[in-house]
Image (tube, helix red, strand yellow):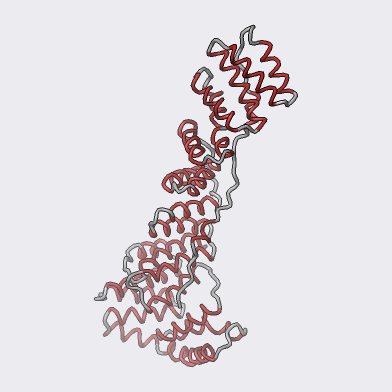
Amino acid sequence: MRFLKLGAAAMASAFLATGVMAPAALAQQPVAVVSKAMGPPVNEAQAAIAAKDWATAAAKLNAAYALAKTPNEKLAVEQLRVSVAANANDWALLIKAVGAIETLNLLPAADMKAYRGVMPEAYKKLNDTPNALKAQKAYFEQYGGTNQEMAVFAQDSVNAGDHATAITYIDKAIAGMKSSGAKAPESFFRVKVRAVQGTGNPAAVYDALGELVVEYPKDEYWAQLVARTQDEPNFGASMRLDMYRALLGAGVKLTAQQKSSAGNEAIERGLPNEALLMLEAAVTSGELTSEFDTKNLANAKTQAPKDKAGLAAETADALAKGDGATIARIGEAQLSYGDNAKAAEVLQAALAKGIADAGKADIARLHLGIAQLRSGDKDAARATWATVKADNGAGVLAQNWILISKAVP
């Protein structure tokens, strides 16, 4: 059976709330001094603003602007126009007025930061996504931003198809959270997965998913990572049982179908005790009811005691006379009975003797790492898995086990 993979839609949800600066806050910005001639229309405009009569205020400001002679007088009008636009939700006017203030270049840097901060949201309100993103990026480059603001920007960039920019800013947001001693929300990592998906680089997607699963180890993420094994060019039946082992190692609860398949794979590989562990509780509880499963369970119950009784002698014989591949199979059998220390010893002996097939040698290393992890030696396990590169699925599963060793207590 093939493991189910998450579709793109499953990774598309990011759950980020939009965080923006409020344009109305600009109404409190200090206004430049105006001439005596401009006084009446400016005063009338301010009175209209106080009365929330935005149309009158705009008209009076147009009259005042016609009387402006100096840059400072023009600045005063534009500042009041921003106040009117912000309160009247006239986003086009706000953008035009802030642009004029920028051109005049008379305000202190702190005041200009406040004005520039509302430009991205104003463009958003006009559904002008390209300019909204451009304005937000320019703001970040000049002033920086909060981790939440950068995460929202990254999400908006993904939606606009600018995946490179999205990756840059979501990485900044995640790193910023980490440097502050906090863990980034799950939504941040999901945005990164979406962004990387857009680059069309499958390996990078799984790397991003790996970052996510270490912080938020959920079954759906583990399933996606383990399912990747099937895409390896030399994947075969010999790796199916190891896929189930990885899911169990990650704490994933197998479905009834998966338990059935895993039990059968264990029988096929001559590992009756592992089949027993996969099937007994499920059959006894009625979760598995087919004749196929009850037959496999009966076979496992019959074979497991005999297999275990002869395992010590078989191990000794293999170590004395067998080749590396034979010894490795015995090591896997020891692993299936939970004798992890012995399994590690036998698998190390197999590798020391040499296994001609490089792919099978890496499978033995995969199993050695599992034995080491189960024995409590995470560092040794990770070092072993780091050497596994085979494209038969062992390399992918070794990377999964490294993540499991980090995410699962």
Asked if residue 395 lies left or right of residue 48, the reply is left
Along the viewing direction, whichever of 243 and 138 lies nearer the viewer:
138
Along the viewing direction, whichever of 287 and 121 lies nearer the viewer:
121
Residue furthest to the top in view is: 36
Asked if residue 105 lies left or right of residue 362, the reply is right
Task: Examine the rendered structure and indicate whether residue 69 appears above or below residue 391.
Answer: above
Task: Examine the rendered structure and indicate whether residue 308 appears above or below residue 397.
Answer: below
Residue furthest to the right in view is: 51
In the image, residue 293 lies at what x, y percent? Answer: 52, 88
In the image, residue 70 lies at what x, y percent? Answer: 54, 11
Residue 353 visible from this viewpoint: no
Residue at 39%, 65% (x, y): give it: 381
Along the viewing direction, whichever of 339 and 300 lies nearer the viewer:
300
> Residue 243's quadrant in the figure?
bottom left
In the image, residue 384 lies at what x, y percent? Answer: 35, 65
Task: Examine the rendered structure and indicate whether residue 198 appears above or below residue 293.
Answer: above
Residue at 62%, 19% (x, y): give it: 62
Along the viewing direction, whichever of 337 and 73 lies nearer the viewer:
73
Residue 392 visible from this viewpoint: yes
> Residue 401's quadrant in the figure?
bottom left
The number of callouts visible is 0
Residue at 61%, 25% (x, y): give it: 82
